Image (cartoon, coloured by chain):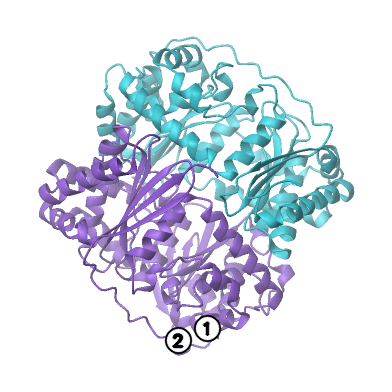
Chain colours: A cyan, B purple
């Protein structure tokens, strides 16, 4: 909990440890479908009543599913805080998944999967994850599932997943805004205190080995104006001591200013792409470092060659001291900005809690970044980046030759 | 209760420098940050055939170095303060921003003053940006919904330059020259066509002196000529049907709508909240948060019933009359004609019967809550001040709340009859064709 007074509003961020990794092996997409239906009827409220209560207060619930978390996020006016917590607690504790709602929401999800099928960015990213995390690994399965699986999911499948994975011990609530912490605690106690379900054992996710050879997959989508390239590696877990070095390396490589070295080369100098960047998602298991770019079909080979060059260059020669210092200074000084809004603070707190970083993490982070040496950054680049071990996916108006 | 972020315009410090630059400053001491936005009254409506997209391209060029900021030193000035920077161009305006720790204020103002007067327009950079923008355009075309949007707007307007996309038409992007770009820059990037906004943990007097120091020497020029074309009244329904390879059908309807200075804007805003949920009025913030819409009429009739997977309304505050757009992602298995028939049934009903008292209260509550939510950061507050000053006046910010609260049932009914009339609409279909 954190009290702020910028606006008379409160951000609520509830995270249940029931992300897509808790999907049964044969039904990927179950947690995602649950997120579409969970707020459509509870023990004491119909879907219409919930809709009225939310809409009347100007609230849009946002329900998202990542690999590890099932999150319910919203912002309400301070005066509505208690009523809203009561409502969303019931949504999390006692959903009923009414059949008519399930039918309608399944159609929505199916439509959304078909939209994704026509989206080169989504297809390239999902295919990259499936190749990096192969053999049914939960990180490699599509979060929304497939059309066939979603159509076959029934009420009992969702209710059973809910019974097995939803419990107070698996829930973290972050409340940030213009509300007294004592009062917020009372409200949370009243809303969740009666919920006694025992926390389930955590789902074990198997570790992954880095790729040993280069792989390329092409998904021709000749109806599209532009191709999406996804290029990546598996790297480290979040708790790895080299995390801060790899974070800084990635920032120099594909984030700083207009997307780091990748942006300098592929966007600014060569004018090939409107967007090109890299992202690091060190996680519970070895997370991906992936590069993304959108380029015309005729530039795909050239773009991949440029990415290969940059990958090889940073692995061989490392970063300069100035690059490292610039990125470090940026990340340290960007903290007040990322913690400006209630929603930003709530997201930060959830991340801190999920990875066990401690409530003083915002204060410790600058020193953690300052302690990283150039040698450590360069070692991280050498260890994880290598064109000969890259997994590359192209989706769009391009055919391999 | 804490200070409300949306201060009355009277609390905003206002000044006009001798060269005509307007400066608006709001002190906000909630975080050790400052946000600077520089706004220009130039957008894609100020473009003639042959150079569509020039405003947006100029925006791109204006990140590529100046006389006193060499090209290789653009990066780092704001980053050393942990700051972010960006810019955007739309139909009425071009805007640039930096948000960083407050000690960056001097550097932020320096960058914006350089951008106003001293950009380089190096030929190599023009060529690099040409292909970057073509990539941006093609990325947009990958999205069938965006593609349809462009077609519908171009069909809804036949005379007014709101008809062409801000990014421009592809052939214009292929043929425009460096001179086209730099002429446009010289014509519109003058202090008396701009508004500088500063919000954050700053001292108002000191910030104004700093603005004077950085911008005071830039000479004012003759104001650029203003567009005189008005879109003639639409006298019959228009249709556009796009048949392209795809997986999903989209339905989009555009209705000519009042501009921000017209009192009729507010009843339409309420009507949209009743039909699709309240979207709010901050372009910079609102598109990140979906509207509350579970009990909205079109959500109920299309999404609840499984005919569509999404429905959204868009009432944009604009300088001149633009369009109110309703967009629908049609659910797998639903014929487009069915979705369209249900949509028009609902629109006919509201045009016939108006809305209820309960709906009016809910729409007001939603819109009022959105006004709070969308002013949650100094960046968002600064956006709103500059946006409204550029398309109308900063005083609109004061009028929003009372204007929304005073909308009457009969005004909403009038808006429904006038705006949603079949003769005023352009209907667009995206009909997906199977591969091959």
Query: Quarter holding the C terminus of chain B?
Result: top right
Neighbor class of circle 1 (other Cα within 10 Å; few <14, some 14-19, many 20+) is some
Residue at the (66%, 22%) spot, across then down: A137
Q: Are marks 2 and 1 in contact (CB under 8 Å)?
A: yes
SS category of the residue bearing label 2: loop
Identify whether A236 is placed above or below B6. above
Q: Do marks 2 and 1 both belong to one polypeptide chain? A: yes
Identify whether B306 is placed above or below A264. above
B219 or B106, nearer to the observer: B219
Q: In this orientation, does residue A356 appear?
A: no
Identify whether A122 is placed above or below B222. above
Label 1, on which residue? B216
Q: In this orientation, does residue B431 appear?
A: yes
Residue at the (57%, 16%) spot, across then down: A26
- Horizontally, residue B346 falls left or right of residue A130, namely left
SS category of the residue bearing label 1: loop
Image location (x, y in percent) of residue A53 = 26, 32
Quarter-wise, where is residue A193 in the image? top left
Chain letter of disc 1 in the image = B
Residue at the (43%, 83%) spot, across then down: B20
Which residue sits furthest bottom?
A: B222
Neighbor class of circle 2 (other Cα within 10 Å; few <14, some 14-19, many 20+) is some
Image location (x, y in percent) of residue A188 = 39, 24
A327 or B201, nearer to the observer: A327
- Horizontally, residue B424 falls left or right of residue A95, namely left
Identify whether B197 is placed above or below A308. below
Label 2, on which residue? B18
Circle nearer the N terminus (2, 1): 2
Which label belongs to residue B132?
A: none
Chain letter of disc 2 in the image = B
- Horizontally, residue B251 falls left or right of residue B29, namely left
């Amino acid at each position: 909990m954190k009290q702020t007074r910028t606006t008379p509003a409160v951000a609520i961020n509830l995270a249940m440890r029931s992300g897509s990794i808790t999907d049964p092996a044969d039904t990927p997409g179950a947690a995602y479908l649950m997120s579409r239906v969970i707020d459509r009827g509870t023990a004491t409220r119909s879907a219409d009543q919930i809709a009225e209560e939310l809409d009347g207060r100007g609230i849009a619930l946002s329900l998202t599913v990542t690999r590890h978390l099932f999150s319910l996020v919203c912002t309400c006016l301070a005066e509505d805080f208690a009523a809203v917590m009561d409502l969303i607690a019931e949504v999390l504790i006692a959903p009923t998944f009414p059949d008519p709602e399930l039918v309608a929401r399944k159609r929505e999800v199916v439509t959304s999967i078909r939209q994704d099928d026509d989206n080169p960015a989504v297809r390239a990213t999902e295919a990259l994850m499936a190749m990096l995390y192969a053999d049914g690994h939960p990180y490699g399965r599509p979060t929304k599932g497939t059309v066939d699986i979603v159509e076959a999911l029934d009420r009992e499948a969702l209710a059973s997943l809910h019974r097995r994975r939803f419990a107070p011990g698996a829930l973290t609530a972050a409340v940030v805004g213009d509300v007294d912490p004592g009062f917020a605690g009372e409200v949370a106690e009243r809303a969740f205190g009666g919920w006694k379900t025992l926390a389930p054992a955590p789902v074990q996710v198997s570790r992954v080995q880095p790729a040993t050879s280069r792989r390329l997959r092409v998904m021709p989508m000749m109806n599209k104006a532009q191709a999406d390239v996804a290029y990546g590696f598996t790297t480290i877990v979040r708790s790895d001591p080299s995390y801060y070095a790899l974070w800084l390396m990635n920032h120099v490589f594909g984030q700083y200013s207009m997307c780091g070295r990748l942006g300098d080369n592929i966007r600014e100098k060569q004018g090939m792409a409107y967007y090109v960047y890299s992202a690091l998602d060190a996680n519970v298991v070895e997370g991906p470092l992936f590069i993304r770019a959108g380029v015309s079909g005729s530039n795909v080979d050239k773009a991949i060659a440029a990415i290969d060059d940059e990958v090889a260059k940073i692995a061989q020669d490392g970063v300069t001291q100035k690059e490292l210092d610039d990125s470090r200074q940026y990340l340290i000084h960007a903290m007040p900005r990322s913690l400006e809004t209630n929603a930003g603070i709530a997201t930060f707190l959830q991340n801190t809690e999920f990875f066990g970083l401690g409530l003083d993490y915002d204060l410790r982070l600058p020193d953690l970044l300052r302690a990283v040496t150039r040698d450590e950054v360069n070692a991280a680049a050498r260890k994880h980046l290598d064109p000969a071990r890259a997994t590359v996916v192209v989706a769009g108006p391009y055919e391999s030759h | 209760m804490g200070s409300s972020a949306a201060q009355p315009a009277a609390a905003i410090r206002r000044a006009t420098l001798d060269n005509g630059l307007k400066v608006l400053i709001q002190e906000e001491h909630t975080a050790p940050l400052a946000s600077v936005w520089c706004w220009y009254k130039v957008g894609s409506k100020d473009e003639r055939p042959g150079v569509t997209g020039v405003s947006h391209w100029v925006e791109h060029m204006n990140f590529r170095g100046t006389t006193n900021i060499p090209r290789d030193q653009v990066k780092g000035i704001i980053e050393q303060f942990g700051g972010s920077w960006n810019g955007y161009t739309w139909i009425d305006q071009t805007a640039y921003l930096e948000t960083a720790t407050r000690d960056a204020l001097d550097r932020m103002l320096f960058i914006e003053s350089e951008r106003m007067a001293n950009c380089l327009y190096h030929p190599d950079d023009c060529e690099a940006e040409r292909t970057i923008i073509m990539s941006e355009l093609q990325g947009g075309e990958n999205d069938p919904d965006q593609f349809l949007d462009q077609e519908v707007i171009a069909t809804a307007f036949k005379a007014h330059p709101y008809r062409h996309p801000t990014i421009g038409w592809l052939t214009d992007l292929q043929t425009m020259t460096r001179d086209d770009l730099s002429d446009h820059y010289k014509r519109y990037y003058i202090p008396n066509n701009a508004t500088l906004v500063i919000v954050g943990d700053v001292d108002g007097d000191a910030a104004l002196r700093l603005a004077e120091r950085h911008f005071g020497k830039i000479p004012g020029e003759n104001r650029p000529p203003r567009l005189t074309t008005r879109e003639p009244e639409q006298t019959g329904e228009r249709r556009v049907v796009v048949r392209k390879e795809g997986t999903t059908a989209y339905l989009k309807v555009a209705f000519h709508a009042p501009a921000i200075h017209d009192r009729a804007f507010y009843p339409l805003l309420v009507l949209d909240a009743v039909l699709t949920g309240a979207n709010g009025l901050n372009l910079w913030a609102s598109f990140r948060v979906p509207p509350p819409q579970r009990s909205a009429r079109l959500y109920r009739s299309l999404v609840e019933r499984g005919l569509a997977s999404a429905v959204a309304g868009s009432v944009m505050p604009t300088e001149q009359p633009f369009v109110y757009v309703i967009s629908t992602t049609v659910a797998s298995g639903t014929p487009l004609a069915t979705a369209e028939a249900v949509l028009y049934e609902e629109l006919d009903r509201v045009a016939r019967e108006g809305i209820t008292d309960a709906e009016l209260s809910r729409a007001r509550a939603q819109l009022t809550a959105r006004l709070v939510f969308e002013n949650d950061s100094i960046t968002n507050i600064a956006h709103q001040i500059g946006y409204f000053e550029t398309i109308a006046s900063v005083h609109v910010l004061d009028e929003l709340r009372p204007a929304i609260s005073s909308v009457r049932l009969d005004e909403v009914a009038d808006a429904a009859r006038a705006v949603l009339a079949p003769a005023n609409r352009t209907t667009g279909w995206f009909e997906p064709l199977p591969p091959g």
